[in-house]
Image (cartoon, coloured by chain):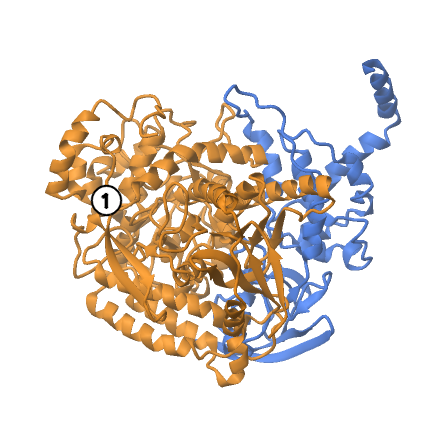
Chain colours: A blue, B orange
Amino acid sequence: MGSNRHFRVWRGDDTGGQLEDFDVEVNDGEVVLDIIHRLQATQAPDLAVRWNCKAGKCGSCSAEVNGSPKLMCMTRLNDLPLDKPVTVEPMRAFPPVRDLVTDVSWNFRVKTQIAPFKPRAPDAPDGTWRIAQSDVDRVQEFRKCIECFLCQDVCHVLREHHLHDEFIGPRFLVYAAALEMHPLDTGDRIEALRKAHGIGFCNITKCCTAVCPEQITITDNAIIPLKERVVDEFFDPLGRLLKVYSRREGA
Amino acid sequence: MTDIQREPYDVVVIGAGGAGLRAAIEARLAGKRTAIISKSLFGKAHTVMAEGGAAASMGNVNSNDNWMVHFRDTMRGGKFLNNFRMAELHAKEATDRVWELETYGALFDRTPDGKISQRNFGGHEYPRLAHVGDRTGLEMIRTLQQKIVSLQQDDFAETGDYEANLKVYAECAITDLLLDGDRVAGAFGYFRENGNLILFEAPAIVLATGGVGKSYKVTSNSWEYTGDGHALALRAGSTLINMEFLQFHPTGMVSPPSVKGILVTESVRGDGGVLKNSDGKRFMFDYVPDVFRKQYAETEEEADRWYTDPDRNRRPPELLPRDEVARAINTEVKAGRGTEAGGVYLDIASRRPAEFILKRLPSMYHQFKELADVDITKQPMEIGPTCHYVMGGVEVDPDTAAAAGRVQGLFAAGEVSGGMHGSNRLGGNSLSDLLVFGKRAGEFAAAYASSLTERPTVSQAAIDAAATTALAPLERGDKGENPYAVWHDLQEVMQGLVGIIRRKGELEESIKLLGDLRVRVAGVGAIGGRKFNPGWHLALDLRNMLIVSECTARAALEREESRGGHTREDFPEMDSRWRQVNLICALNATGDGVELTHKPLPTLRPELLGLFDESELSKYMTKQELTDYEAAAAAAKQVTVHDTVDTRIGG
């Protein structure tokens, strides 16, 4: 069956920690999460890790494998150079809790800051809506998000500059885009995007798109269109003039 | 003793999947201060794994559909062992519950005229599953999450506190329910992050903890599925029913070994995929049982015509209920017609164009590509049965979701409850079940809390005992046995002896081995501290897995027939006398084992009985039952299912 390989797993907590070395059996077809589970069962029963579905659908087992933000359940050993040690570390943009587990609670607080879904009045007498599939398709891309927070982990605005109070990060720009482009939604999040949510901090390096395990085209399909909406609303002189004019007309 | 945080609530919902979130929304809307307790992070619940869709007879794709047809399909799928009232409520209310999700912001796939689209699934007569590609469960969880956040935003606007009336306790596990006499008074548990202990003081508790699959080696279930709610209910004096019925989903991945068990959605078959053995034969035509003969095609030609002309052709046998398909695959593999890895082939590549597959089954494409190096638009998938769902669960009142037994104030909804699906659940009936009975559980838990004139209280002795139990594995430390080793052995017993095909001798052996494991579970130890310590968490989960496994093994030994998710090699036929029996599990007098009793099934109301042909009923019911029903069925004969929906019937 398997042969042994060298893994280095970060162990520690909010007070500090270091990489610990393990020699562990690996088998054909296995993923990094299999190895972490084997370590728990055989060498380190208290090794802390989050995981749920082990099928890339829940977004729990986010970590940095050989320095790259990955879902451990979808990272196959075949794709790693096993002649060298494999390093597994927690996401570095979030405070460590223990071992591979980080404190991601900030993300859940951010969500409460985004204006909720506000549907238009129903189209049909029975209280339902009629929506074209093409309008659904665009938003469904954003709704694929499994909230693994790897995009937040890799975003330099959060990771290096720690602007958590001023910038909601790619995950929540995708969330806002899903609401803004929802065919039934009538809410307005444009001013909040510009000010409270700090969309201007994103300088389109597309690191988030590169790490998204759901292959959501975060920058091109979510963030840039939102930036355009912000520009149209606040920085288009002709548009502003028209708006002032039409407001007067309406009054 | 240790410091214990106390939090008072009106309603506490244990579990944050579809049923739990829907229950919490309802309790909060009823004005109750509500807590949601999630074993994982908020939004990671097992519901996200549900792929196919939510069954609701909206009739958007085939207008012949209505609740009566859905009810009929559900009863057939469950081989008439279902609690008929639950199946009836489910069929009637699923449409409103699914539509309601759209008001919360869900975005389902559409029909050409812009309505919610519906797809075909095993055992459903018409296209009935509202869906979002093959990630419907994720859409449902995100939608309910979004609704909860919006309610918190409303509360913030009013009180300045997002969590004033509805709070999510993430990564928090409940180890015991605490009672005041026979009344629910609180839920005791710990936070995974720091190991701190917490007592929720509440007069009404909703269990929505999902299933039990982690007692099996090959399963589609996540680590959370350790039967917590089942065990909490038992220990609180409630009862479980139908625990012998486990659904082995016919299509789990089989290769490479490390992905064994991961679910392959039934939508592959609903959208045209077929099952083939290693000889290339489409074998399901050989496995259509008598009770389903009338509804399923006999030739490949007829089966293939059905996809485009369902009114004049019968369904492909790949779309039989899951228990039938799983058994058929098992038989093929045993007969030596399986693949090397012990599965069979599921082929959609040769039957549908690549772009169709990519649009309809994107996450399956992704899953096989990433995990197995298989391109499902070009190659067949290799699949085999995987432990997926427990039909059995907490015995509940069908209308209120209140748990049976002496305990008051306890409710259960979703997979943790029993009865709704009888001996086998139809695909798509789970997501709708979560919504229908989640709402009902929240509503009636809130009403129960309102009806009390004084709050039940928790005794200090009960709190101390719960704390001692919770901390015991840490106390034993390295002097106790490794919980992972015990878990592994429990999985071996359940997979090997209480699996898809069961035999008397093996079941007796399993009960003996579970007895040995009980001693070992009581002695497991966890090294390390209280901070996010998975060894400690597993040690506590094992207690639940063990008692629930014992329920399954004992009920499986007792039921001497084969029906739905319970197949006895020594009793291969369905026996109409056993259809009249529910097996009820309760905790025994000493509190360390399970006691089994027989209880008659509730009798179907005549107007519901009238929805079936007598010839069909005769396959399920005893002669005596049929004689008794004859007069009643004749009276209800005028009711035909193809009439327009008449909600007065049975309502």
Residue shown at 16% from the left, 58% from the top: B571
Residue shown at 54% from the left, 80% from the top: B475
Residue at far bottom of view: B479
Residue at far front of view: B453
Quadrant of image for the N terminus of chain B: bottom right
Secondary-structure class at tag 1: helix
Task: Name the image quarter holding residue B67.
Answer: top left
Give how far across and how far down residue B520 sits, in percent. Answer: 40, 78
Residue bearing the label numbered 1:
B285
Quadrant of image for the C terminus of chain B: top left
> Is residue B317 visible to us here?
no
Judge by depth and name the residue closer to the eye, A238 or B282: A238
Give how far across and how far down residue B27 sits, in percent. Answer: 54, 43
Task: Name the image quarter holding residue B298.
Answer: top left
Judge by depth and name the residue closer to the eye, A129 or A144: A129
Judge by depth and name the residue closer to the eye, B603 or B48: B603
Give how far across and how far down residue B34 sits, in percent. Answer: 58, 48
- Figure check: A228 above or below B328: above
Q: How many marks?
A: 1
- Figure check: A172 above or below B592: above
Relative horizontal placement of residue B465, taking residue B622 as reference (left or right) = right
Give how far across and how far down residue B628 sits, in percent. Answer: 14, 37
> Is residue B575 visible to us here?
yes
Relative horizontal placement of residue B156, taking residue B567 as reference (left or right) = right
